Amino acid sequence: MLTREFWDERYASSDRIWSGNPNPHLVSTATGLTPAAALDVGSGEGGDAIWLAAQGWQVTAVDVSPVALERAARHAAEAGEAVAQRITWQPADVLSWDPGRQRYDLVSAQFVHLPPPGLTDLHRRLAAAVRPGGTLLIVGHHPSDLETSLRRPRLPELMFTAEQVAATLDPDEWEVVVAAAPQRQVTDPEGQQVTIRDAVLRAVRRS
């Protein structure tokens, strides 16, 4: 699940894997921010990056799969030249890739799951990439989702809580705005409504 080959094969298996809609926690966070430089990690088919660019953000969108990035670039072109020109699509393996220090005003990682300690290391690199006054937003599947009827991989070590992410941040450098597990309703493979929780960490680097 961590390789380029796995994700290339998955994206190539269908014309569309995800809905194309931006993730709701990103929308609620970014709506209150002044558009500047954003980093979208695990950008997939481009739903989040395209939405951010449409709001005026300059977006660097990173994914391990060139198949996903090519599809995302096509979707961005369909959204219009003004949107497409605001996005840079970058192939990268997040297990080793370094986004640089204090380069972005918003860093978003939506449902990027790695085994520890790789995930903790990634979160620290993403935090380092946020400029003073900027926002770090990390959202993932909460461990309680394993108890639902959704077809999550039965790999509890890949799940995390917002509190675990918050513990990697230096409180002298960060204000944790949200560290929570809000509920939402989704439909399981049998068509039944299921309540799930997202792990949501939103923090602002102190100026």
Image (cartoon, rainbow, N blue to C red):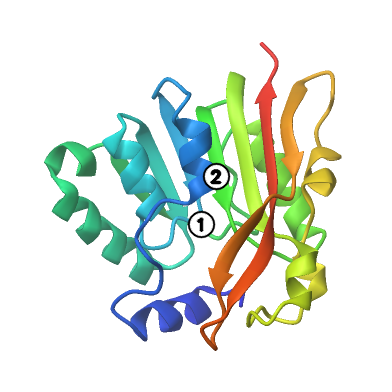
Q: Position of residue 202 (x, y in %)?
A: 66, 35
Three-letter amino acid code at the position of disc 2: His
Q: Position of residue 1 (x, y in %)?
A: 61, 78
Q: Residue at x 48, y 24 (%)?
A: 32
Q: Secondary structure at mark 2?
A: helix
Earlier-in-chain disc, 2 versus 1 = 2
Q: Position of 104 compared to 171: left or right?
A: left
- Which residue is disc 1 drawn over? 42
Q: Quadrant of residue 177?
A: top right
Q: Residue at x 37, y 86 (%)?
A: 13
Q: Secondary structure at mark 1?
A: loop
Q: Residue at x 83, y 44 (%)?
A: 163
Q: Residue furthest front?
A: 193
- Which residue is disc 2 drawn over? 25
Counting the numbered discs, the total is: 2
Q: Nearer the viewer, residue 168 or 30?
A: 30
Q: Residue at x 50, y 73 (%)?
A: 4
Q: Position of residue 11 (x, y in %)?
A: 39, 77
Q: CA distance from mark 2 to mark 1?
A: 15 Å
Kindly report which numbered mark, 2 or 1, lies closer to the viewer in this rendering: 2
